Amino acid sequence: VTGRRASRRAKGEDLDLFGESAPPVESAPPPQVVSEYFVDDNQYPGESASSPVTVSVLTQTARDVIEGAFIPLWVRGEVTDFKAHRNGHWYFCLRDRAAQIRCVVWNRDQRGIPAPPDDGMQVVAFGRLTVYPTRGEMQFSITRIEAEGDGLRRKALEATRKRLEADGLLSIERKRALPRFPRVIAVVTSPDGAALHDIVAVTRQRAANVRLVLVPAKVQGDGAPGELRRALDRVNRWGEADLVIIGRGGGAREDLWAFNDERVARAVAACSVPTISAVGHEVDITICDLVADYRAPTPSAAAEAATRSRAELESELRKLSLRMAGSTRAQLRHRADALRHLGRDIVDASSDVMARRRTALQGVAGRLHALSPVATLARGYAVARDANGRTLGNAGSFTPGMPFDLIVQDGVVPAAVRATDGEHRDV
Amino acid sequence: VTFEERIARLEEIAAQLEGRDLELASALALFEEGVEQLRAAADELSRADTRLQKLVERVDGTFDVADTRE
């Protein structure tokens, strides 16, 4: 009677029953059936119609046998009928052309699986074969799944990327420019990884004038996302860095997984100073890379992008010096030219004036010459002057006996009027 | 004054010197300042040194930057 009821239930309430299943540790202890094993001294259970076993005994025994016969193992197959039940467990079938097996991934075993598989995915799954007595079915209880072509990780990555994109964290406009001359660079990475070594070496080699401040964090394994987030948080609270490099050297893809963590990506986006992500080798692009202000293909490249080499800076200074000297010289030349022009104008202007004056002077001189008594004297005339130098021009100016000078062409002749009281004669 | 500020000031000076309407006295003063800034920047460069330190958070949430031995 019990058996018939169980099989009816199995047919009637397929999915619900399926959902009722729970992890083995939480299931009720198997029914106590030991007393039913030996109904008769000479018969093993179920040997004859008079010694039947119950369905519970049957399925429980099958379970014991199967669990004892199989160690946990990897199985390959195609996923079908996937269902994430609201109780948190995943149910699906794995099948190939000829067979299928019911599978379950208990809620607590899902942590190690990047994303739930999709129907049609080719996967290999690691688990333990058991029997689910309530339904009398074999069930493969899975703890790890790897999809062909890393499909699950890609699916998880894509889902994370979509969420970050929806929040605008991947947009180009968000990208901040890196400081041209950073003084303090926070390096969030493992203290003993290759990344730190490379960053320090490249920075030294460039003789860049910076302080590199290591902010240690685990970069792979279980605690890595949390440590990376806390390190970024420290950089923010510390507040003295101009720039953050976050990264690690190359490794297997699962070693880089912490840099695909959504919360790490959000912490990078929330960083108060510009960020450079430098994760792994060139080909590995992580979610962190998408969110950071600058993505460097390697830690060495990050150091190069972050710092200016001494040679570069010196050449920059040289250029500035040349620019300044050149333009100052040009300013001076400009002024000197202006002065020269001004000078020439003044000279030009003044020589005009002089020329005009010279001409005027010559005119005056000509007239003066014409008027000069010297010229008249040269023609044989003489001029009489009194003792005071006044010209004696009229007969009336002369008195009898008066002395006077007679100016002739080449000298002065002392003379006197005759002392007689003579008549003036008209000329 | 940071190296970056110095370079920025130098660029400003160079740009001003390249301008047209500048009093001769200001031009010369700018040039003089530029030379001074250049000397200081070059000085700083010659002292260039890459230091590696480590950020340590104290229990009270304050920070200490310690030199590391590599």
Image: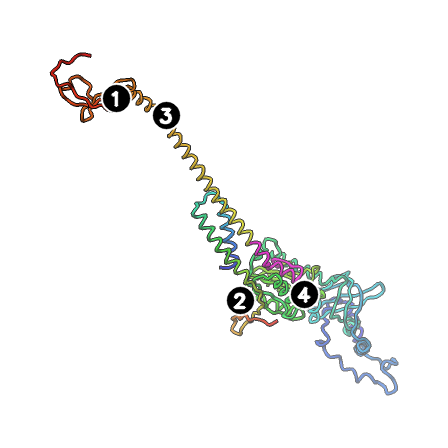
Q: Which residue is mark 3?
A: A359
Magenta stretch, main secondary structure class: helix
Q: Is label 4 in a helix, a strand or a loop?
A: loop
Q: Is residue A198 magenta?
A: no
Marks 1 and 4 share the same chain = yes
Among the two numbered marks 1 and 4 on one chain, the one whose residue lies closer to the N terminus: 4
The amino acid pointed to by label 1 is: Val
Q: Earlier in the sequence, mark 1 or mark 2?
A: 2
Question: Which quadrant would residue A85 be assigned to in this image?
Answer: bottom right
Mark 1 lies on a secondary structure that is strand
Q: Is residue A330 above or below residue A80?
A: above
Q: State which tag comes first along the sequence, 3 or 2.
A: 2
Give amino acid for label 2: Trp
Mark in front: 1 vs 4: 1
Q: Where residue A300 appears, x then y in whole percent?
A: 65, 62
In primary-sequence order, the first of circles 4 and 3 is: 4
Can you tell which of label 3 and label 1 is closer to the viewer? 1
